Amino acid sequence: MSPVLPAHAGYFFGRSVVELAERLRDSSLTSVELTQAALDSIERLNPTLNAFVQVDAPVALAQARKADDLLAQGQDLGPLHGIPVAVKDNIDTLDYVSTYGSAHFEGFRPRRDAVCVQRLREAGAVIVGKTLTHEFAYGPTGDRSLQGAARNPWVPECITGGSSAGSAAAVASGMVPLALGTDTGGSIRIPAALCGVVGFKPSYAAVPLEGVFPLSSSLDHAGPIANSVEDARLLFEVLSGKACAATATEPRAVRVGWIRSGSFGPVDAEVDQQVYQAAKQVFGDTLQEVTELAAMAAGMKETLLMLQRAEAYDVHAERMQEAPQLFDQEVRERLELSQEVRGWQYIRAQRAQQQYQAQMARLFEDYDLLVSPSVPIIAPPVNARETPVGEQLIDVRAAVLSYTSPWNLTGLPAISLPAGQVRGLPVGLQVIAAAGEDERLLQWLTHHTPT
């Protein structure tokens, strides 16, 4: 296995959107030049990584020329004006086909943009193409899609994680500086962690989902993937329609809880050690071990499964009856399991979700932030469904979801930060805040983590 990065990275590898925006405004760069750099990087890297499923150079360059013209006329639409952005293929775009990763929608062209895409356009961003999603976003590995498997930029034989597989690979490889993803059980944070970039799942409903193909209505979120927290914050502000206010000096030390290792399932010992050391570097002696979550883990997992299965089958019931053969086999099997959820189980799961949300609100009376590994393993090979952790083999899909999905159930903002590498592959540090504390979380991390 020979790593692709960073020697062969694209133009935007590690580049700051803030720096690019400054260069656009001092006329040392144009949006057309940035967009062409993205297109050139995609042409060179995408045959290996399969991050983009659709790119239209004339469409992208036309957007870039418009952005340059507006700046020349003195019309500045904000920090993302003229910046290339990629959009996950389960999010509707008027000028690009949206397949949702499925043969059911091959060639489908939406009639309008999703609200979040509309907001990107209004901010002057240049949408350069659509990125691969696990079919209907129903999978955390990123290797089951109409367009095949996305590949990890560090070791292409390995998964990116999913379902925002292409978005993470596109940013991590330097094809684009920003990408839009969605997250129902970890689908932004998992690929961000496994590919070595920043991925932010906002609080539930902080970003509107109109025009995003649904997976599970009570768990779905949309958010940014970026090279840095600051860049993620800029994209989140556009997506949410709400600028993050400057954070005043903290009146006291931030109280940070390290979720006890193993609370949500097995963790690779090297991953655990690497992420803990990264957490110590960011938070220092404020880290305190949190033990309360281990007792909640099994119930939270079961509750999320009931909600997700019932809501996913609601979305796909007719397709399952009329054309089940068009689904990927693995996705179809998940939907067949979903069909078995009873009404009373779903109602109980809704009540349990509210109870877990209340329990987390009480826990956040004692802590400002919780931290853990984003994903307890490094990226396994494409199509692998078991992976060794210590002396046991564990299910890949269950493992990669284990530390991210609780925060979809409870709707809390959670971000994955790059935390170094283990055995040549990236690992992530997950930071979770109380409900609605998105701005405070992003502002604090912007000022306390390396760029």
Image (tube, rainbow, N blue to C red):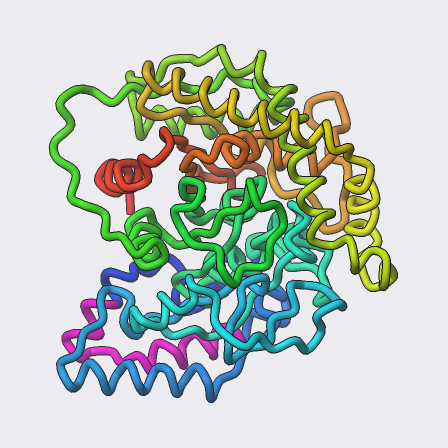
* Region in magenta: 21-42
Please report the residue visible at 36 percent of the width from the left and 67 percent of the height from the top.
120
* Residue 18 lies in quadrant: bottom left
Please report the residue visible at 30 percent of the width from the left and 85 percent of the height from the top.
66
Q: Is residue 331 left or right of residue 159?
A: right
Magenta: main secondary structure equals helix
How many labels were placed on the picture? 0
Residue 59 sits above or below residue 279 on the image: below
The image position of residue 428, as x and y in percent, is 48, 38
Tell me if residue 2 can be seen: no
The image position of residue 234, as x and y in percent, is 29, 55
Tell me if residue 170 can be seen: yes
Please report the residue visible at 53 percent of the width from the left and 68 percent of the height from the top.
92
29 part of magenta stretch: yes
Instruction: Name the residue nearer the viewer: 143 or 312.
Output: 312
Residue 70 sits above or below residue 159 on the image: below
127 part of magenta stretch: no
Residue 384 sits above or below residue 259 on the image: below
The image position of residue 306, as x and y in percent, is 69, 32
Q: Is residue 20 left or right of residue 424?
A: left
The image position of residue 64, as x and y in percent, is 34, 82
Instruction: Name the residue nearer the viewer: 229 or 203.
Output: 203
Residue 221 sits above or below residue 320 on the image: above
Please report the residue visible at 52 percent of the width from the left and 36 percent of the height from the top.
408
